[in-house]
Amino acid sequence: MDEFASLSAALVSRELWQIIALSLTVSLSATAVAAVLGLPLGTALAVWRFPGRRSLILAANALLGLPPAVVGLALYLVLSRSGPLGFLALLFTPAAMVVAQAVLALPIVTALAHRAAEDLWARYGDALMDLGASRARAVPALIAMGRLSMLTAVLAGFGRTISEVGAILVVGGNIAGYTRTMTTAIVLETSKGDLPLALGLGLVLIGLTMMISAAAFGLAGRSSW
Amino acid sequence: MRRLLLLMLAALAGLPIANAADEPAGAIVLATTTSLDNSGLLGAILPAFTRESGIAVRVLAQGTGQALDTARRGDADLVLVHDPEAEQQFIAEGHGIEQRQIAWNDFILVGPTADPAHIAGGHDAVVALAAIAAAMTPFVSRGDRSGTHALELRLWRMTGIDPKSGAGGWYRDIGGGMGQALNAAAAMPAYTLSDRGTWLSFRNKEPLVVTTEGDPRLINRYDVIELNPAKHPASHLAAAHRLAEWLVLPDAQAAIGDYRIEGEQVFHPSAASPR
């Protein structure tokens, strides 16, 4: 019973809600950045033919396995006071965490958007061009046509960001009340030996992720095009 | 899709605002050890400082080696650590200036209740480590250049045994924090060296118990070190100076001494009479 006392106490605390809010803000922001850049980029890679296109596609796919700890470390060195962007004073702030997670999510969104757009372009590309659409106009049209696949791409990016701990631990510092998220709190509670609380936080995180996925598909399913 | 994107953009737009809102007039980054933060001490005493001064303290809990490195790069405003040798080097390099002891407690050897190395009840850490090595029973090392790791290596040097000879066997370098080391030691089970603060607040002790304590070589001193303005002009050194001064004032010292975990005093204030 004693073991679950800390868990139930934590579940009703203001601190927990702060942590949840920060987790969602950081990960949704990073996903938004990745979506805004990655969906058009991935789609454009399907529509245009230009030198270097294949290597870009290859790069996006290779970077699907980008190790978070390495991204965190690289960004740490860049954002450190003694690094090239140190003057921005971004290290150990939520903004640095958004940048790190956006870097991790961007290849995922780009690669999956490219895959979806490639099929659509092969099937409907000629028709779109016959209707007088330019390639530039075809990009948003393809994103709209493939919106469910595009949503999957964005949610895959979100899944990467909300579950990630290696990068944000390094660039955020897990500072209580400022850069502590669900995942860094789980690592911290595990290190304090409070395994029931760590597991409880993990279940809350999984629940939240599922709710967001369900809500996103609900929205996309209802909207028409 | 578009609505989802709009939602996400709204979240993004909200971020800087949220940041600005909890950005107090002054905020400093305190690079410190996990033992002070995980034990709950800083969470218990720092709110009073923030109320008095209006300065928020962002606590970055790392091993001592990493905390000093963070400060060397200019990414912290003040350090509060516990490795006398590493601190001397930090000061000799010109990074640190004013160094003050704020509190002390002690390190302990913990190990399985079954005590395969037969060291329980002893008061000599060096003898205990030698017995662990002789029995080749598992020992977990932090291996992370923390203050605790540095002390562990100094104690091994006193035994004349090179623990690396047991690497891959009984000597298990986990490269992690104190909590990780205790979790690993509990699971194996193995002996390990822990600071008392982390041990008292640790909640996954089974089947570990304290096997060795009371050796004067196991004293654990916590020092606050201010940074040299000549090397770290961009840091918030005025605010950091206020915190350093505050930590040695009678009120803060009393709060450190009053901090209890399950009724037990964890830190002994020592600004007035450094140990």
Image: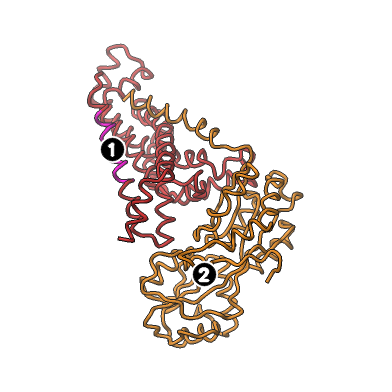
Chain identifier, colour orange: B
Span shown in magenta: A205-218
Query: Can you identify the residue that label 2 sits on?
Result: B196
Residue at position x 57%, y 79% in the image: B155
Judge the density around disc 1: few (<14), some (14-19), many (≥20) Cα neighbours within 10 Å: few
Give the CA separation, mark 2 to mark 1.
Answer: 42 Å
Query: Can you identify the residue that label 1 sits on?
Result: A211
Residue A112 lies in the magenta-colored region = no
Q: Position of residue A33 (x, y in %)?
A: 43, 32
Q: Position of residue A75 (x, y in %)?
A: 53, 45
Residue at position x 62%, y 57% in the image: B69
Image quadrant containing the C terminus of chain A: top left
Give me the chain letter of mark 1.
A
Magenta: main secondary structure equals helix
Chain identifier, colour red: A
Q: Name the image quarter holding residue B124.
A: bottom right
Q: Three-letter amino acid code at disc 1?
A: Met
Most foreground residue, B64 or A194 = A194
Left or right? Give the position of B275 relative to A182. Answer: right
In this orientation, does residue A20 appear?
yes
